[in-house]
Amino acid sequence: MTEKLKTALKKIAQIGLPLALGIIILYFLYNGTNFNSLWSDIQHANWGILTLSLIFGLSGNVIRGLRWELLIKPLGYTPKKSNLIYAVLGNYAINFALPRAGEIWRCGVISKDEKIPFQKLIGTLIIDRAFDTLMVIFILFIAFLSNVAVFYRNQDLFNLPSFLISPVFYAGCFAFVILIAVIIAFFKDNFIVKKIRAFLASMWNDMKIVWRMKEKKLFIAYTFGIWFSYFLYFYVTFFAFGFTANLGIAAALFIFTLNSISMGIPSNGGLGPWQAATVLGLCTFMVDNNQARAFATAVFAFQSIWVVLCGLFGIAALSLKNRKI
């Protein structure tokens, strides 16, 4: 097999596999859907409220650009805030075309424009993602605590397996965590354990870098600001539909956690996994399956268009600034 053919096949896989995965998920998710009813639910949405939600999505990404600056400064560089924000916006638009490529693109464009070594920017991106992972874990914990009483009180109403409300299940989970910790501690020469230890060590070193930075309080504030904005980006949309308006903030937090986790699956801007996670979460709170699909369809489509438009603006703004230079 020639090198050109290998490269071509790799590109096809990078583009085609995530898209195929998203389409397959959507096929099974929407199989048997009453599309007339779905379209009717979408038409009755409050589009003014959906438009309001867009502000919070944009603000979260702007704050992400500002937080990125805090990670770059300790390296001895002072990039323009506007360039970082534009790059973050462009990042998400590119991810719709080629999953995960947006992160590489934003490091590349800032490396070129701000004369910062690409490898150093990749390092800041790893820290960026590490803290996002920690925030998702934190939000998952809060979401569970916020809803455990509701799940227990209404266990006959929710479509939850019985093991989820069993103390034995959680005791088993705790024992499993202890077992993993013991394996990591005493089987240091195992190949998999080495990988896990290296990953944990990397995360620990990343956190120490943040702890040593002069503006760590601002970094933490930005981190919470990003995820609070993202939550409002999702939660506000509940009020655009009659069947979700009264679900409450705890339910929204639980469903938000599910679709945040789903974004870890390589797909075109979350296409497929996001809708599936959202429908699953809504159905858990007894929203009709068809209405849940209508919600996921409308919110994902509307907000995705916004993300792409903001991203195209960011890419164009960077291009125009470079021309002036």
Image (spheres, grey):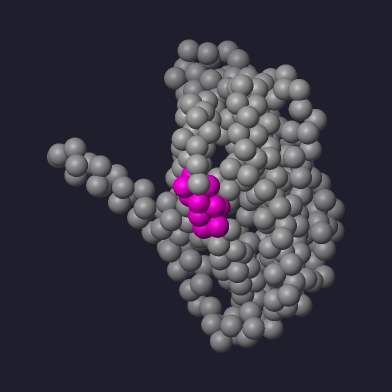
Residue 193: percent from the left, percent from the top?
51, 21
| Image height of 130 relative to 259, above or below | above
Taking the image as shown, residue 234 lies to the left or right of residue 84, namely: right
User: Which residue range is magenta in the image?
Assistant: 311-323
For this orientation, the residue located farthest to the front is 324
| Image height of 177 relative to 280, above or below | above
Residue 110: percent from the left, percent from the top?
52, 37
Residue 146 makes an appearance in the image: yes
For this orientation, the residue located farthest to the left is 1
Q: Nearer the viewer, residue 11 or 174?
A: 11
Residue 102 makes an appearance in the image: no
Q: Residue at x 55, y 62 (%)?
A: 309
Q: Nearer the viewer, residue 240 or 229?
A: 229
| Image height of 116 relative to 38, above or below | above
Q: Residue at x 71, y 53 (%)?
A: 59
The rendered magenta stretch, by its main secondary structure, is classed as helix
Taking the image as shown, residue 21 lies to the left or right of residue 142, namely: left
State the count of labels.
0
Q: Quadrant of residue 124?
A: top right
Is 254 in the magenta?
no
Q: Quadrant of residue 54?
A: bottom right
| Image height of 29 relative to 138, above or below | below
Q: Residue at x 81, y 56 (%)?
A: 250
Residue 322: percent from the left, percent from the top?
49, 44
Q: Nearer the viewer, residue 83 or 147?
A: 83
Q: Residue at x 80, y 30 (%)?
A: 217
Residue 34: percent from the left, percent from the top?
55, 82
